[in-house]
Image (cartoon, rainbow, N blue to C red):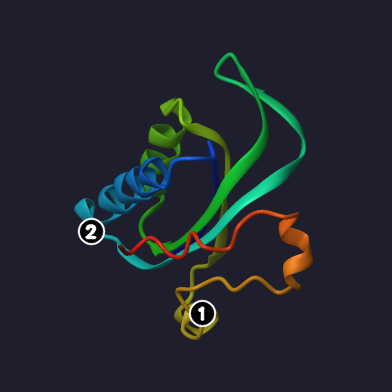
Amino acid sequence: MLYELIAICRPGNLAEVRDIARTAGSLVLNNGGVVRGFTNWGPFLLPKPLHVHQATHSRGHYFIMRFDSSANTQHMVRRTLKLDPRMIRFGMVKMGSKLEEIADVPGKAEWKSDDSDRRGFADGLGGFAS
C-alpha cells in the first residue's frame, strides 16, 4: 500500500529534521517497504500555536515522505514518531492499495502554490541531501 507521511518538526535545526526523516525511512526499509521519496518543504508558520511535549510552537519544519509498506510497518512508523519529542504533528494518508491507483504517483510532493505562502522564511534550506 502507498502511504504519504506529512510531518511537522521543530524548526531551526535541519540536522534534527534529517534524523527524523532518516529514522522513519529506515523503519520502512528494514521492514521490507520501499521509500519512494522525500520532499523538504521547509519552515512555515503553523495555522495556530500548538502545545506539544510541554512546549508551545508557532512555527514548524514540514517534510513529506511517500512510501510503500504493509499496514504493520505504517503503524510502527506512527508509533515511533508519536514518541519523538522533536515532532510537533504528523499525519499519514493511504494513497492507494491497487497497482493501477499508485503506479504513476511520483516520490516527490511538489508545492502547488506561489512562494508568498512561505511567509518570509529563507528558501536556502534545500533538500535533505547534503
The residue depicted at 38 percent of the width and 34 percent of the height is 80
Dividing the picture into quadrants, the one containing residue 11 is: top right
Considering only vertical position in the picture, is 126 above or below 63? Answer: below
Residues packed near mark 1 inside 10 Å, few (<14), some (14 to 19) or many (20 plus): few
Secondary element under disc 1, as helix, strand or loop, is loop
Secondary element under disc 2, as helix, strand or loop, is loop
The quarter of the image holding the N terminus is: bottom left
Please give the residue where the numbered disc 2 appears in the rendered image: 32
Give the mark nearer the N terminus: 2 vs 1. Answer: 2
The residue depicted at 45 percent of the width and 80 percent of the height is 99
Dividing the picture into quadrants, the one containing residue 66 is: bottom left
Residues packed near mark 2 inside 10 Å, few (<14), some (14 to 19) or many (20 plus): few
Q: Amino acid at mark 1?
A: Val
Q: Are marks 2 and 1 in contact (CB under 8 Å)?
A: no
Total number of numbered labels?
2
Tell me if 36 is positioned left or right of 49 in this view. Answer: left
On the image, the x and y values in percent for residue 8 come to 57, 43
- For marks 2 and 1, give the one nearer the viewer: 1
The residue depicted at 42 percent of the width and 29 percent of the height is 84
Residue 72's disc number: none
Dividing the picture into quadrants, the one containing residue 29 is: bottom left
Q: How far apart, in angstroms, are the residues tagged by discs 2 and 1?
A: 20 Å
- Residue 69 in view, yes or no: yes
Considering only vertical position in the picture, is 15 above or below 107? Answer: above
On the image, the x and y values in percent for residue 83 come to 43, 26
Q: Amino acid at mark 2?
A: Gly
- Residue 5 in view, yes or no: no
Determine the residue located farthest toward the top in the rendered image: 54
Residue 105's disc number: 1
The quarter of the image holding the C terminus is: bottom left
Nearest the eye: 88 or 61: 61
